[in-house]
Image (cartoon, helix red, strand yellow):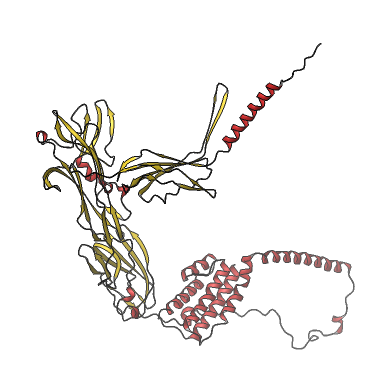
């Protein structure tokens, strides 16, 4: 058998190597594509006030960040959204496999040039992994509106400086020159041969309104009565304006449908720069706003673009394309003035506000807690309302101790809730509360008042030790556990025989050893149990509870400050209950204490003693009469002793 050995000629080897190198080279280039910014625009020729769709793609970027357009000084920049381009596509055609990988993010903007001298869109930049990428700049042509008298835009406002929440109305008048004499009775908006006149009114688009500017009605309510729809090829061409791209164009069975808007026209005359009287049809758009935040607001510009009939040539109407831009309106919104501002002003601006107050309970004793609720409601800006300063009411601080209010927001209303305590019985009503707001229509402050609330306050009841610590019932003397002998160690023995040594017994000693072993086992188990208990924080806390309370009571001195004395008493009682029941002492009220005692199984009588004493100490802070310091200390120590014993038994 003859065996042939295959060999590869040098030319074939070289061809194979080159192909392999080319393949590897392509793969390397594909795998090492550099990050880049791809810039695209939908057009490069616009009028001032028209917009360009500007699209940036950060390509071959793993973790892109938004591009920087801070150098776009001559453009109004509006961000439209972003879209991830991370994708991987594999296709196999005729056995050949291809793979396309996209990694990055696409960002889209609307650019509106503000200056006709602008010749390019600047180059954007983006920070990618510490490296700054720069895209390309785009040359554009920005055309300034030409001087013409065919279509005029006149925008005005009935007020250019307003107080917050005062309505103001913006008016746009669109003047379209009448058609030539032969057809002057026809609407100049009905002769467009390709598309209706396009009108962009930013303040009729809620998404383009500045933050803090609130329309009184929706744009739909303004445009709905003006809406007209016609079909090209079935009826006459559309007669009206296409506004903010709201008018839709679609293909139907009857032809092309176009939605346009047409206010009722009004014939007017205008004198041009050369002194000639020009006849126009005037179309008016209006919208009323209020400002809820102070500052300067810009409205506009409005722009118009369309082809209008201007003359009759060879029996046919000839037209001219017109682009017009209005001026921008500036509106200044002001806060309530400082001049003549009353002290009862609560930061509310609007009209027809009312104030109501309620007090619960309206009867009680000196030092008892009460809750005051004040509700302010009306039409206007109420978000920044602050609670009325009831402490500034004359005589309030001598009659009531008040605390800062909480605030609850409701629709067109604010509710302020105060905590207070009466300090004297010489009060028969809670006084009226003055509340001031600013009326932007009157341009002046208005003060309203809540109604006075009748109250009945009695003296705080003085509690004696007998009231708080009930006398314990008579207890039977305990049976003596040991009876002493009066005669000494030999008093009960009549002879020495009774003291003689006993004889040795194995059974007796076996019992002793068994007892000792049993005792050792019991002690060992007890020690292990104690070790486990001492490793339990709750057990350690309960074990130290009475000692902690005793240490707290050591600082009680009859001559100390009343507030310090009451604080120490509260700390002792609340700390004792908290340590035994495993709760927090901070913020514990008398009701909380009773609940914890009830959960621990403490009897009802001791629960009520604790509640009464804690309530008495709480009331004493606010002017209620106290027992003498020495009586108070005695009552406290007795209560702590009884509580400690009961809690130790139950816990």
The answer to which of 431 and 301 lies nearer the viewer is: 301
Q: Closest to the observer: 115 or 421?
A: 115
Percent of width and height locating residue 339 = 26, 71
**Residue 353 in view in this figure:** yes
Is 534 in front, or is 80?
A: 80
Is 299 in front, or is 249? 299
Task: Say left or right for 319 vs 518.
Answer: left
The image quadrant where one finds the N terminus is: top right
User: Would you say 227 lies left or right of 135 here?
Assistant: left
Q: Farthest right residue?
A: 504
**Relative to 620, 101 lies left or right:** right
Task: Locate residue 482: give its quadrant.
Answer: bottom right
Please tell me in which quadrant of the rendered image residue 320 appears: top left
Query: In the rendered view, does 158 fall on the left or right side of 396?
Result: left
Q: Position of residue 367 (x, y in %)?
A: 39, 77
Answer above or below: position of 250 versus 404: above
Q: Residue at the top extreme?
A: 1
Count how many numbered circles sit on residues in the image.
0
Residue 66 seen in the current view:
no
Asked if 71 appears above or below 255 in the picture, the reply is: below
Give the answer, above or below, for where 124 lies relative to 491. above
Q: In which quadrant is the C terminus drawn?
A: bottom right
Q: Give the quarter of the image for residue 277.
A: top left
Residue 81 point in image, percent of width and height: 41, 44
Q: Residue at x 58, y 82 (%)?
A: 554
Q: Residue at x 25, y 64 (%)?
A: 354
Counting from the top left corner in percent of width and height, residue 9 is at 71, 20
């Amino acid at each position: 058998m003859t065996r042939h050995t295959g060999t590869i000629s040098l030319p074939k080897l070289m061809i194979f190597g080159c192909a392999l190198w080319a393949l590897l080279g392509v793969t390397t280039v594909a795998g090492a594509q550099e990050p880049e910014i791809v810039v695209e625009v939908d057009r490069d020729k616009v009028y001032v006030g028209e917009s360009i769709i500007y699209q940036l793609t950060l390509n071959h970027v793993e973790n892109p960040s938004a591009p920087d357009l801070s150098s776009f000084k001559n453009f109004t920049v509006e961000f439209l959204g972003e879209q991830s381009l991370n994708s991987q596509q594999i296709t196999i055609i005729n056995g050949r496999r291809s793979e396309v990988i996209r990694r990055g993010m696409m960002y889209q903007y609307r650019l509106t040039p503000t200056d006709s001298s602008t010749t390019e869109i600047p180059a954007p930049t983006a920070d990618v992994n510490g490296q700054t990428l720069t895209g390309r700049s785009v040359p554009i042509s920005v055309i300034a509106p030409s001087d013409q008298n065919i279509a005029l835009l006149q925008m005005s406002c009935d007020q250019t400086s307003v107080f917050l929440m005062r309505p103001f109305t913006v008016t746009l008048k669109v003047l379209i020159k009448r058609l030539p004499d032969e057809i002057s009775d026809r609407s100049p908006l009905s002769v467009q041969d390709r598309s209706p006149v396009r009108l962009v009114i930013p303040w009729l688009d809620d998404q383009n309104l500045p933050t803090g500017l609130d329309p009184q009605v929706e744009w739909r309510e303004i445009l709905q009565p003006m809406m007209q729809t016609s079909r090209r090829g079935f009826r006459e061409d559309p007669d009206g304006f296409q506004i903010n791209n709201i008018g839709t164009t679609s293909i139907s069975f009857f032809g092309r449908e176009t939605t346009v808007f047409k206010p009722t026209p009004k014939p007017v005359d205008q004198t041009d720069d050369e002194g000639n009287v020009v006849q126009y049809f005037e179309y008016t758009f209006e919208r009323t706003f209020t400002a809820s935040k102070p500052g300067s607001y810009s409205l506009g510009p409005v722009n118009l673009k369309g082809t209008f009939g201007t003359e009759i040539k060879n029996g046919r109407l000839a037209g001219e394309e017109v682009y017009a831009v209005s001026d921008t309106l500036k509106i200044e919104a002001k806060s309530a003035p400082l001049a003549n501002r009353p002290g009862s002003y609560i930061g509310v601006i609007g009209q027809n506000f009312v104030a109501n107050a309620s007090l619960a309970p309206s009867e009680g004793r000196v030092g008892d807690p009460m809750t005051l609720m004040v509700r302010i409601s009306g039409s206007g800006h109420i978000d920044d309302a602050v609670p009325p300063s009831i402490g500034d009411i004359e005589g309030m601080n001598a009659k009531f101790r008040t605390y800062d209010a909480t605030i609850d927001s409701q629709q067109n209303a604010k509710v302020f809730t105060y905590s207070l305590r009466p300090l004297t019985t010489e009060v028969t009503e809670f006084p009226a509360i003055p509340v001031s707001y600013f009326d932007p229509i009157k341009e002046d402050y208005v003060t309203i008042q809540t109604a006075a609330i009748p109250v009945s306050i009695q003296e705080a009841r003085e509690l004696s030790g007998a009231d708080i610590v009930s006398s314990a019932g008579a207890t039977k003397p305990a049976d003596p556990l040991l009876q002493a002998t009066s005669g000494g160690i030999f008093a009960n023995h009549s002879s020495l025989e009774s003291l003689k040594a006993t004889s040795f017994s194995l059974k007796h000693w076996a019992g002793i050893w068994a007892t000792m072993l049993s005792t050792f086992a019991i002690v060992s188990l007890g020690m292990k149990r104690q070790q486990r208990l001492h490793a339990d924080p709750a057990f350690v806390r309960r074990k130290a509870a009475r000692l902690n309370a005793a240490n707290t009571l050591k600082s009680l001195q009859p001559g100390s400050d009343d507030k310090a004395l009451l604080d120490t008493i509260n700390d002792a009682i609340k700390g004792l209950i908290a340590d035994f029941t495993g709760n927090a002492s901070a913020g514990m009220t008398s009701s909380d204490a009773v609940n914890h005692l009830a959960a621990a199984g403490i009897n009802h009588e001791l629960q009520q003693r604790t509640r009464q004493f804690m309530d008495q100490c709480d009331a004493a802070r606010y002017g209620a009469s106290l027992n003498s310091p020495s009586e108070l200390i005695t009552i406290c120590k007795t209560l702590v002793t009884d509580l400690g014993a009961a809690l130790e038994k139950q816990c």
